[in-house]
Image (cartoon, rainbow, N blue to C red):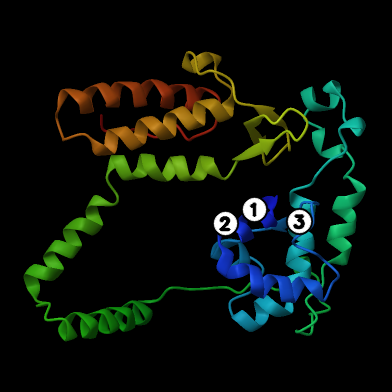
Amino acid sequence: MRAYNKKKELFAKKEKIELMDEYLSMYDIDIHGIEPLWNVEFELHRAYIKSFGISTVDELLQNAESLFKKCMDNIRLIDPNTITDKMIESGHSNRAESMPIWNTIKEAYRINGFLQSPITLERLKRKEYKYTEQKAIEEHIALGRKAKLHGVVIGVPFYEEVSRKIEEQFTTKYRLKEEVEKLKEHFEDIKVFNMESGETYRVRVDKQTNAAYRLNPIESFSSLTDYELFKEHESLVSKLLKHPINSIEEKTAVHKVQLSRKELIKRGLVEDEPMPF
């Protein structure tokens, strides 16, 4: 989610001013006035959109209003007067009420150029996708044709190299990386701007409990919160993948990963599977 003063962008890229001035004037909005022009927008990745069974542009436009309202519910501008320290500490910060302006924006959003689907996102059937051998062959044929057009020679040595690299994806290092990706699903970093103090800081949100808290300095693994431990483990795994095999740097990185992973296992955040290092 991004919320910013659209005027600053327009006057920084002056080629947009004339176009936007004409468009916004239809809504009695003067971009040359002294008042800021706040723009609220959401960036939705393909995986999130497809989770609602939306796979085409037409389906996206037909459900645009529902998606926008869903986003407005997932990320809210809350009234600080409706939240207490006790609510934050107990992980119930999601009970805070939204600011009236947030609800106004949510209900006012319309995309009149496209007929909206009456079916709620929750009721949309999720499309099942099964990857088959035939599908794999078809994709290889398409890639093979592209390679031939560009003069790439495909033969036994080529497929032997592809097979070797596929096997590499299932080595310990890549399994560790997959673990990190799974942990990412539990937490999310959000950048917060305090309009009163002008301070910008990052907040960590536990997606399961909606508990939110500011980042703290990293200390020992045992003293870290689950999210801090996850982020440190992710960083260590990333560094491990960059070091040459059997180098001192790799051995040091392996030791640190072992320690961070041991703490993750202790907390039940990852499975205690044997790792060959």
Q: Which mark is residue 51?
A: none
Q: Tell me where residue 106 sits by quadrant.
A: bottom right
Q: Amino acid at mark 1?
A: Lys
Q: Secondary structure at mark 3?
A: loop
Q: Which residue is mark 3?
A: 37
Q: Amino acid at mark 2?
A: Ala
Q: Are marks 3 and 2 in contact (CB under 8 Å)?
A: no
Q: Are marks 1 and 2 in contact (CB under 8 Å)?
A: yes
Q: Taking 118 as reference, is 186 left or right?
A: left
Q: Are marks 3 and 1 in contact (CB under 8 Å)?
A: no
Q: Is residue 179 above or below residue 251?
A: below
Q: Secondary structure at mark 1?
A: helix
Q: Is residue 133 above or below residue 266?
A: below
Query: Is residue 147 something that shows in the picture?
Result: yes
Q: Which residue is mark 2?
A: 12
Q: Position of residue 238 (x, y in %)?
A: 34, 37
- Identify which residue is drawn at 57% across, 56% down: 12
- Identify which residue is drawn at 73% across, 66% down: 67
- Identify which residue is drawn at 31% across, 33% down: 239
Q: Position of residue 189 (x, y in %)?
A: 59, 39
Q: Which mark is residue 8?
A: 1
